[in-house]
Amino acid sequence: MKLVREMNDAIRHRGPDDEDIYVDENVSLGHVRLAIIDLSPKGHQPMRYEKDGREIWIVYNGEVYNFMELRKELEERGYTFNSNTDTEVILAAYLEWGFDCIKKFNGMWAFAIYDKGKNLLFLSRDRFGIKPLYYYYDGQNIIFSSEIKAILEHNIERKPNDSVIFDFLYYNLLDHTEDTFFEGIKRLMPGHSAVFDLTTRKLKTFKYYELREQVKLKTVITENPAVFRDIFKKAVQRRLIADVPVGSCLSGGLDSSSIVCMMREINKNLEIKTFSLVFPGFKLDESKYQESVVRECNVKRYTTTFTVGDILRDIDDLVYSQEEPFFTLSIYGQYRVMKLAKEHGMKVLLDGQGSDEILGGYHHFFEYYFAELFRSFRWIKLISEIIAYYKTYKSWSPISNMIFYLSPKFVKRLLWKRRFPYLADDFVERYKDRGSKEPQWGAKSLKEALILAETYYSLPHLLRFEDKNSMRWSIESRVPFCDHELVEYVLSLPAEAKIDKGITKKILREALRGILPEDIRTRTSKIGFATPDEDILRTEVGYTFAKSIIESNSF
């Protein structure tokens, strides 16, 4: 019991409103609660449910947005409810549909259900891994939590996983595998569930959702902006379900602006608070676009920024919050935005994560699109797209990268290796056979590249950053562009619905005509959630800090 309380203490930031534990001869379940739906004590966890002599318990983090529709269906099947929570609906759904209950959920979740009658634990994580679930299994016992730090409350050896470190340093990959940077500690992968048999002590994981298969089932010949707008509106509307105020992040880019504008479209009278990162005087400052949304939608805007001094003050807490490495200071920028929202009393924020991966928002997707046009002998279209790209961005860079993707695999490997002269040859040699960690090199079409971005090399780590930064400040972050119905629809569309005539996110731009401010709807500059890393760190203070680490004995 003491260890469970210590695990709760380690992640109290994720749920400061309530806590409890449940212990019997088989399991110890701990929970800290961030109250979002049904703020009463009836939402208390671990939560128990019993029907026809079957007793089950749950610990759960997330939101199932269609819980009211499922509740009605379950009531028609004889189930009763004591609360207005989605948690209780998950329990009843499990009793009714077993392990397949998750296929009926629209939302984000990480949960463990203890089925006392069957003497098992059922663990599950949502389709795209918006909510985290880590575990340590030694062949006899399983320890699990929303964060690694809680697992480390147990007497587990802290040992780095060199193969994951290699993938990070060599392939720029994060959160792409079940292995973490801590050897022995794994993550339950997105779209996966697991069953731990408390009698045999065996753990079995299985995949319940395959995006590629869902997209195959829904291939759409032509895009329809009105259909996109309707699906997107529903995705945002679902994520406004809460018994606390819901705000939004606002970078000024196409994605977060679309969310804020759709929030206003859904409810003309809703008080909307937005939270933004600004860098006055820097080229990548997006204040003017943020202000455009504020004027158009009549929202309250709160802003924050940071200096190198702020970074040095918060770096330990940021690393502790994220638990595993990250690439840029944009992660710190997000940390600051979530902190700002906390200071203004927010518990729920919407954010634009996931749009780039399904709508081809990153510029490297042009290279995949160009390569697809080349392979399919659509060379006139290819030439017109290259010219359109150059006219918009004054760059020929996608051509050289297209050639890279069209090259044989051994050529790609040789060219790639030259980019990492700082890695020791013996380290590279030791892990040279981890070639399966480069599937994005083999994508034959834009659609394949987008699916890989959604499931493998891009979105998984962005969602980790999002969850850890938001929950550090007791904020639940909701991501409408990760609604599985929206994802499946957009990825089923032809490439030209995403990229066309040098423009990204074509269908989003067309669907939100009249809803988005025109200067945002038609903007072509792609900043993303960027921070002026070099300008900030290339100071005497930043240099001294980095030098002190590199020259330390432990390094």
Image: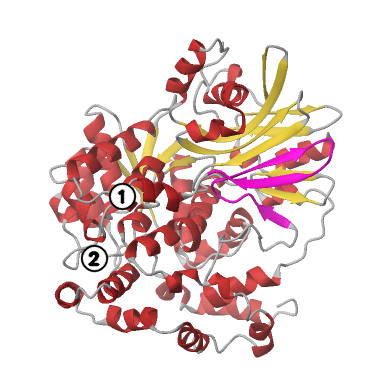
For the residue labelled by badge 1, is the local secondary structure a helix, a strand or a loop? loop
For the residue labelled by badge 2, is the local secondary structure a helix, a strand or a loop? loop
Q: Nearer the viewer, residue 199 or 507?
A: 199
Q: In the picture, which quadrant includes the C terminus?
A: bottom right
Q: Position of residue 270 (x, y in %)?
A: 28, 28
**In terms of sequence position, does the residue under pointer 2 or pointer 1 come before the other?**
1
Q: Nearer the viewer, residue 51 or 256?
A: 51
Q: Which residue is mark 1?
A: 219
Residue drawn where x is 41% and y is 42% of the image: 484
- Residue 86 magenta-drawn? no
* Viewer can see residue 516: no
Q: Which residue is mark 2?
A: 525
- Residue 199 magenta-drawn? yes
**Mark 2–mark 1 contact, CB under 8 Å?**
no
Scheme of colours in the image: secondary structure
Please name the amino acid that badge 1 sits on: Thr
Q: Position of residue 83 (x, y in %)?
A: 55, 15
Q: Position of residue 123 (x, y in %)?
A: 65, 39
Q: Which residues are magenta?
A: 185-208
Q: In the picture, which quadrant includes the N terminus?
A: top right
Q: Which mark is residue 292?
A: none
Cα separation between marks 2 and 1? 30 Å
* Residue 312 against residue 238 in the figure, above or below: below
Number of numbered discs on residues: 2
